[in-house]
C-alpha cells in the first residue's frame, strides 16, 4: 500500500460547532495542499463511534491528531490502541476571546491526548503544534512532519548493500543487518567486493561501450585517463550499475582501497560518483551508516548528497571544509568546471573525480552515528555551501555553518562522533529531527 497521512479531528458536540466546522474545513484544505496522500473523514469525529468508523478505513504512516474541540482521553486511547505509527498532535487556537463562551477548548483536549500518548508509548516522542491552519508555522511544521514520516516509510522498503568490509580502523561504518532492520526498517545485504571485480573482469569492451558513452556525458576529461583505466572503469561501472538495478538496491556502501588499486588496477571512485547522480546513494570505505545518511538526506531534499571527511576549519570565515578522495556525485560539481576527472591523490591512478561543489544558500550537515555504548544518534548542523573552487586534490565542499564552526568541531570531536559526514543540498534539519523522534533516536543539533 502507498504512503498515507490520516487526519483525525476529535471532539464532542457540546462546544461551538460552527467554529469547529470552519477549522475542520480549513484544516482539510491545508493538509491537501501539502500532500495528496492524506485521507480525511466526511465529518468531524464527535463521538467514539464516529472515530472507530473512520479508524476502520485507514492504514496510516502518520496520524495528524487534532482536537477540533475538547475530547477526553478515551479518543486518543482508541487511536493508540489501534496504531503504532508516528503522531502529530495539533491544538487549535480559541477563535474568539470575548468574555463569553469557550468555543473549542482544544488546548485542554491536547493535554488529555498527550497524557495518553505518553502512557502508551513511554519514552517515545511525538510531534506537537499549536495554532491555526492558515498560520505559516503550522503549515511548515505539518509539511516537515509529513516529509519525515514519508522517509520513515521509505526506509521500510530500502535495500541497502555493503560491498566488501570496512578497512582496518574504519569499523565505525560497519553495520549489522539486525540493527538496520530493527531500528530503521531497512534490509542490509552483504557481498564481497571481489564478486563485482570478477564480474567486471569478465566483460568485453563491446559490452561496456554504452556504459562508457553514458559516463562521458556526465564527466569531463575522461579522455585524459590512460586507455586501460578507461576500459576497466567502464567494466566496473557496468558491474555496479547492473547489480544495483537487477537487485533493486537503493543505497550501497562500497569498499574502495586497497582492493580496487591492487586487485583491479582502477579505482571505483568515479563509479560511485555516477551512481549517486543516478539516485543510488553510494558511500565509500564501506561506511554503511554513511550510505544510510546519504539516502535519508537525498529523500528529504530530492538531490544527491556530498559524503566526506571534515578536513579544514576556518574560524574567520566560520567554515568547515569536507573532502574525499574523489567520489562526490558528479551533479554536485561547479558549473564552471563540471565534473572533472583526475587521479587518486595517494595512489596516482584514475579515474577519480576532482572538483569543488556548487554553492547553495541552505545546506544541512548530517550523520547517522552511534555513541560509545552503541546507541544510535543523529548529528545535525545547518549552514550554506560557499562558492569555492576545489580545495584539495579530490572533491571538496565548504560549508559556512549557522553556529560557530570551531565550537561545532570541538564538541563533535569531544563527543566522539565519526569522521564521515553528509552535506545535503537543502534545509532539512527540522525534518531530520522529527525523523529521529519517529525512530526513537536521540538528536543532537549543533
Image (cartoon, rainbow, N blue to C red):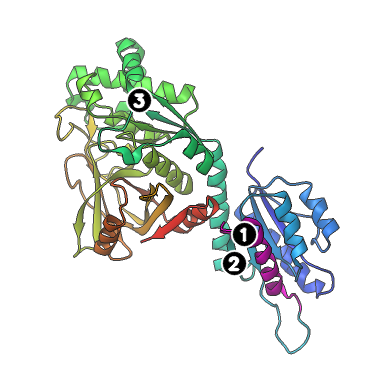
Disc 1 or 3, which lies upstream in sequence? 1
**Residue 353 vertical placement versus 87 (above, below):** above
Identity of the residue furthest to the bottom in this view: 99
* Pointer 1 local density, CA inside 10 Å: few below 14, some 14–19, many at least 20: some
The Cα atoms of the two marked residues, 2 and 3, are separated by 48 Å
Residue 12 in the figure: left or right of residue 343: right
Which residue sits at x=68%, y=73%? 107
Dot 3 alpha-carbon crowd within 10 angstroms: few under 14, some 14 to 19, many 20 or more: few
| Mark 2, residue position | 129
Q: Is residue 76 left or right of residue 258?
A: right
**Residue at the spot of label 3:** 214
Q: How far apart are marks 2 and 1 (CA)?
A: 8 Å
Q: Which of marks 1 and 3 is in front?
A: 1
Q: Name the residue under label 1.
A: 88
| Residue 139 image-quadrant placement | bottom right
In this rendering, the answer to whether 217 lies above or below 119 is: above
Helix, strand, or loop for circle 1?
strand
Front position in the image: 37 or 290: 290
Q: Which residue is drawn at 70% across and 85% down?
A: 97
Labels 2 and 1: the sequence-earlier one: 1
CB atoms of marks 2 and 1 within 8 Å: yes
Amino acid at each position: 500500500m502507498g504512503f498515507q497521512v490520516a487526519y483525525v479531528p476529535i471532539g464532542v458536540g457540546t462546544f461551538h460547532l460552527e467554529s469547529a466546522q470552519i477549522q475542520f474545513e480549513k484544516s482539510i484544505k491545508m493538509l491537501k495542499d501539502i500532500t495528496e496522500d492524506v485521507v480525511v473523514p466526511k465529518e468531524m469525529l464527535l463521538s467514539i463511534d464516529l472515530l472507530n468508523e473512520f479508524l476502520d478505513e485507514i492504514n496510516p504512516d502518520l496520524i495528524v491528531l487534532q482536537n477540533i474541540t475538547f475530547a477526553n482521553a478515551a479518543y486518543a486511547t482508541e487511536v493508540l490502541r489501534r496504531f503504532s505509527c508516528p503522531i502529530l498532535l495539533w491544538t487549535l487556537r480559541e477563535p474568539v476571546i470575548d468574555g463569553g463562551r469557550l468555543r473549542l477548548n482544544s488546548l485542554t483536549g491536547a493535554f488529555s491526548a498527550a497524557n495518553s500518548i505518553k502512557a502508551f508509548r513511554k519514552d517515545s516522542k511525538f510531534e506537537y503544534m499549536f495554532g491555526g491552519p492558515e498560520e505559516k508555522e503550522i503549515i511548515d511544521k505539518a509539511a516537515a512532519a509529513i516529509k519525515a514520516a514519508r522517509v520513515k516509510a521509505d526506509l521500510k522498503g530500502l535495500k541497502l548493500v555493503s560491498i566488501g568490509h570496512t578497512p582496518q580502523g574504519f569499523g565505525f561504518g560497519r553495520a549489522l543487518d539486525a540493527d538496520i532492520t530493527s531500528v530503521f526498517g531497512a534490509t542490509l545485504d552483504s557481498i564481497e567486493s571481489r564478486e563485482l571485480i570478477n564480474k567486471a573482469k569478465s566483460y568485453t569492451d563491446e559490452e561496456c561501450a554504452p556504459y562508457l558513452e553514458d559516463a562521458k556525458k556526465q564527466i569531463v576529461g575522461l579522455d585524459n585517463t590512460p586507455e586501460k583505466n578507461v576500459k576497466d572503469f567502464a567494466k566496473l561501472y557496468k558491474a555496479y550499475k547492473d547489480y544495483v538495478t537487477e537487485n533493486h538496491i537503493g543505497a550501497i556502501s562500497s569498499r574502495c582501497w586497497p582492493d580496487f588499486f591492487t586487485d583491479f588496477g582502477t579505482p571505483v571512485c568515479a563509479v560511485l560518483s555516477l551512481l549517486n547522480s543516478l539516485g543510488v546513494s553510494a558511500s565509500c570505505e564501506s561506511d554503511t551508516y554513511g550510505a544510510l545518511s546519504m539516502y535519508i538526506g537525498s529523500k528529504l531534499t530530492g538531490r544527491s548528497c556530498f559524503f566526506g571527511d571534515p578536513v579544514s576549519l576556518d574560524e574567520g570565515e566560520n567554515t568547515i571544509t569536507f573532502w574525499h578522495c574523489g567520489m562526490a556525485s558528479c551533479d554536485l560539481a561547479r558549473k564552471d568546471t563540471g565534473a572533472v576527472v583526475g587521479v587518486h591523490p595517494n595512489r596516482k591512478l584514475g579515474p577519480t573525480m576532482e572538483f569543488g561543489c556548487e554553492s547553495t544558500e541552505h545546506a544541512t550537515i548530517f550523520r547517522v552515528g552511534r555513541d560509545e555504548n552503541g546507541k544510535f544518534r543523529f548529528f545535525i548542523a545547518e549552514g550554506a555551501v560557499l562558492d569555492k573552487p576545489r580545495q584539495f586534490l579530490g572533491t571538496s565542499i565548504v560549508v559556512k555553518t549557522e553556529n560557530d564552526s570551531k565550537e561545532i568541531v570541538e564538541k563533535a570531536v569531544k563527543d566522539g562522533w565519526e569522521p564521515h559526514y553528509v552535506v545535503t543540498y537543502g534545509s532539512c534539519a527540522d525534518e531530520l529531527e522529527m525523523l529521529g523522534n519517529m525512530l526513537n533516536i536521540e538528536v543532537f543539533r549543533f
